Image (cartoon, helix red, strand yellow):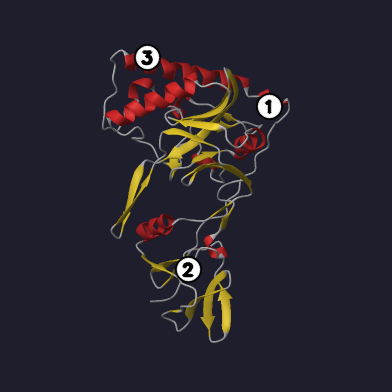
Amino acid sequence: MSTSHLHAVRLGRSEHSSDRSGGLRTVRAAVAVQGASRLRAAFAWLLLACVGVTAPAVVSAQAGTGSRNELVGSLNSDSSVAASPRASVPLAARTFKSAADSMEYASVLAAATNAKGLRIIVSMFDRELYVLDDADTLLVAPVAVAVDTTLTYNGKSWRFETPRGKRKVLSKESNPAWVPPVWHYAEVASRQGLQLAYLERGRAVPLSDGRKLVVRGDRVGTLDGSTFTPVPRDEEIVFDGTIYVPPTGTLNRRIEGELGKYKLALGDGFLLHGTPHTESIGTAATHGCVRLLDEDVEWLYDQIPVGTPVYIY
């Protein structure tokens, strides 16, 4: 079997212009009005639920979604996103996986609606993020949410969902790099029919063509005699039908640009972050994080202090 590399499209880029004039309270007025209307509609649903109109259980809220090609908005000349009715799940179709899931939705929605001060609210049904300060809507932005699926590979399972609940902004970072978890490599292996193995420092892996796969310093590469050839950082490490997980701390385990220009950490690995995959915005496409256009996450980075509460329902 010949030795080969599986090239990963990791470095896609998309530049967006942004209009930041007017300071903190400058927002896209039409979108903000629509976002506020959705919050009122959701709260109306909550009131109906409280008087006995309950939501069906078991059915996934993300049914029929997840295609990265499903565009739900269009880019205008100023690079803002025009909201589309397809971006939200109609109230009548807002079904839940269980009664507990329905109750959590209602609880977080009520807490977000009744909270005071500056706060971030994420509606997974509407696939929108709102920034409110008391009753004032400062920002409405389209987002991508989790695909709500499970990956099973080689006896292990990973659940990709955005959990409902209240969190807070723990930290902020510009130009973040993504360190892929093991599930990333398992996902590639599952899709491509590959085996999965782990590289270790100090242990060479013999390849079918006589070379060796080794870790030297912060790079993974092949050793042919005394000649070391690094594996390109924008490629998965695939040889002889096996994808290798590089050690944490190597440059091959660090992907630049995948999280966009900024990230806000919410704890437990969940982030608000940008993305080069702008076509995914408005869809169920992530592995748990909330993706935004770079200009919207830049606004959050500039205007939202660490400690700000985040409500996800």
Q: Which residue is mark 2?
A: 5
Report the residue at 46% width, 72% height from top. 200
User: Residues under labels 3 and 2: Cα distance?
Assistant: 56 Å
In terms of secondary structure, where does tag 3 sit?
helix
User: Residues under labels 1 and 2: Cα distance?
Assistant: 47 Å
- Looking at the rendered structure, which numbered label has been put on residue 142? none
Amino acid type at image mark 3:
Leu
Horizontal side, residue 53 vs residue 246: left or right: left
Horizontal side, residue 282 vs residue 305: left or right: left
Q: Is residue 30 above or below residue 215?
A: above
Q: Which residue is mark 3?
A: 47
Report the residue at 35% width, 35% height from top. 64
Depth order, front residue of 39/268: 268
Q: How many marks?
A: 3
Query: Is residue 89 something one can see in this rendering?
Result: no
Horizontal side, residue 11 vs residue 282: left or right: right
Q: Position of residue 231 (x, y in %)?
A: 54, 70
